């Protein structure tokens, strides 16, 4: 289950109760859990899957993912289906306390009954139990009261929207659009990363009826780009979700983990529906670059440094290498309003996802190679040359 307050990532997708939603020998519940990226948030580095312990930083302090294995003492082994459903859809634990909206239950509220049942069966019957105890959250006691979360839930959780018309269409357009809407707005909770948030950290929109839904946001120092103005073809978008790279693009940073743990396992039909739904948005101005996030521009130094450190892979023309090194031309990280993601890639390096049948390519870190001023100059040279503002 993907973190909502500071979720990373994003284009996460999940299956519903369709008969073909479980590829190979995977059970329907396992498919949903894997595609919903439960393991990414509920598994600490080097820890047992779903045993919790992973830390997430929030505006009120650090919280730790809980153990959701079927262990009866440390996990959710004593949860009835009703308890499980209430936690997933309403954000209320078995003992009645409100969960932090680090779990995207406002989106999960839209999931079908069968999906929730399949998910419950998977956790109770297929996930190995772990006795790992939950960690206490590092939140000051003045801010740790849970009762305000009940008010938050009342304001933002709408469990009456759990409707999926994907199996009752009149034409192919409606089939793909309905299925894609269900996956993106419901179990996929794409908006957790790609939708801006309000003052109480709620998503400003939870479905396509909102003009700001999926219009992009900053998440934990990374830019989650707008998904309303994707310019690639449906096949390119499907390939990006399945392998983490396409002819001219590659996913990096937190999104790399999403593909590795989640979207590579999606069925072709679900990726088709997701892509169809996203490409039906038509807001060409969304996500356009603003110079408000620019650093002091030093084009000569930036160009020289780019030639020294970057051009070998990305090319003097910034077009990269097909299916290997992403193009910088109109790249969403390059054209973002805030340069934080591009700085993170240059500072710390990154790598493309490791998926079945595809090797991962790694970009080195330059934090110890270039000074901060030099890295800033490279960022501004790249943004000034291949960002959308270069055409203005």
Image: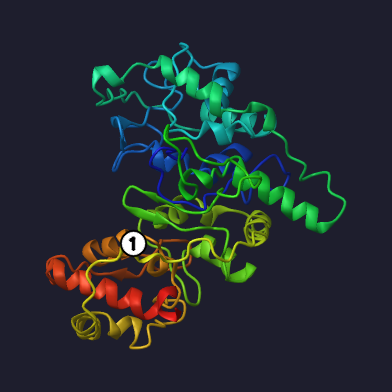
Which residue is drawn at the image coordinates 51% and 17% (left, top)?
79
Above or below, comparing residue 249 to residue 241 in the picture: below
Which x, y percent locates residue 163? 72, 35
Above or below, comparing residue 345 to residue 277 in the picture: below
Which x, y percent locates residue 247? 50, 77
**Residue named by callout 1:** 292
**Extreme residue toward the top, this view:** 95
Quarter-wise, where is residue 381 in the image? bottom left
- On the rendered image, what quadrant is the C terminus found in? bottom left
Which x, y percent locates residue 168? 83, 44
Above or below, comparing residue 281 to residue 85 in the picture: below
Which x, y percent locates residue 34? 51, 44
Query: Does residue 72 appear in this view?
Result: no
**Is 222 left or right of 82, judged from the image as shown?**
left
Query: Does residue 19 appear in this view?
Result: yes
Above or below, comparing residue 325 to residue 288 in the picture: below
**Is 161 left or right of 51, judged from the image as shown?**
right
Which residue is drawn at the image coordinates 74% and 55% (left, top)?
176
Quarter-wise, where is residue 310 in the image? bottom left
What secondary structure is found at the residue carrying circle 1?
A: helix
């Amino acid at each position: 289950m993907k973190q909502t307050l500071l979720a990373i990532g994003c284009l996460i997708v999940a299956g519903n109760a369709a008969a073909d939603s479980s590829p190979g020998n995977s059970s329907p519940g396992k498919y949903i859990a894997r595609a919903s990226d439960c393991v990414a948030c509920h598994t600490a580095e080097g820890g047992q899957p779903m045993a919790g312990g992973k830390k997430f930083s929030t505006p009120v302090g650090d919280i730790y993912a809980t153990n959701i294995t079927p262990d009866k003492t440390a996990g959710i082994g004593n949860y009835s289906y009703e308890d499980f459903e209430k936690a997933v859809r309403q954000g209320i634990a078995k003992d009645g306390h409100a969960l932090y909206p680090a779990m995207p239950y406002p989106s999960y509220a839209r999931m079908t009954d069968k999906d929730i049942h399949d998910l419950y069966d998977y956790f109770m019957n297929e996930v190995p139990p772990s006795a790992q105890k939950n960690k206490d959250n590092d939140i000051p006691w003045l801010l740790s009261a849970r009762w305000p979360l009940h008010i938050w839930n009342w304001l933002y959780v709408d469990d009456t929207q759990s409707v999926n018309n994907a199996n009752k269409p009149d034409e192919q357009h409606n089939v793909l659009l309905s299925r894609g809407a269900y996956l993106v707005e419901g179990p996929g909770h794409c908006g957790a990363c790609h939708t801006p948030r309000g003052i109480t950290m709620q998503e400003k929109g939870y479905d396509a009826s909102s003009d700001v839904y999926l219009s992009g946001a900053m998440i934990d120092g990374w830019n989650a780009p707008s998904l309303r103005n994707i310019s690639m073809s449906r096949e390119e978008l499907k390939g990006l979700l399945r392998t983490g790279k396409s002819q001219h693009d590659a996913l990096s940073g937190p999104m790399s983990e999403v593909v590795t743990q989640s979207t590579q396992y999606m069925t072709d039909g679900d990726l088709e529906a997701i892509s169809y739904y996203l490409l039906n948005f038509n807001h060409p101005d969304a996500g356009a670059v603003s110079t408000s996030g620019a650093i002091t521009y030093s084009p000569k130094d930036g160009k020289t440094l780019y030639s020294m450190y970057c051009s070998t892979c990305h090319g003097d023309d910034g077009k990269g290498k097909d299916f290997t090194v992403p193009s910088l031309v109109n790249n969403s990280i390059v054209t973002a309003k805030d340069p934080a993601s591009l700085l993170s890639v240059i500072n710390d390096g990154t790598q493309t996802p490791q998926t079945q049948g595809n090797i991962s390519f790694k970009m080195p870190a330059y934090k110890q190679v270039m000074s901060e001023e030099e890295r800033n100059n490279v960022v501004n040279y790249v943004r000034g040359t291949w960002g959308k503002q270069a055409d203005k």
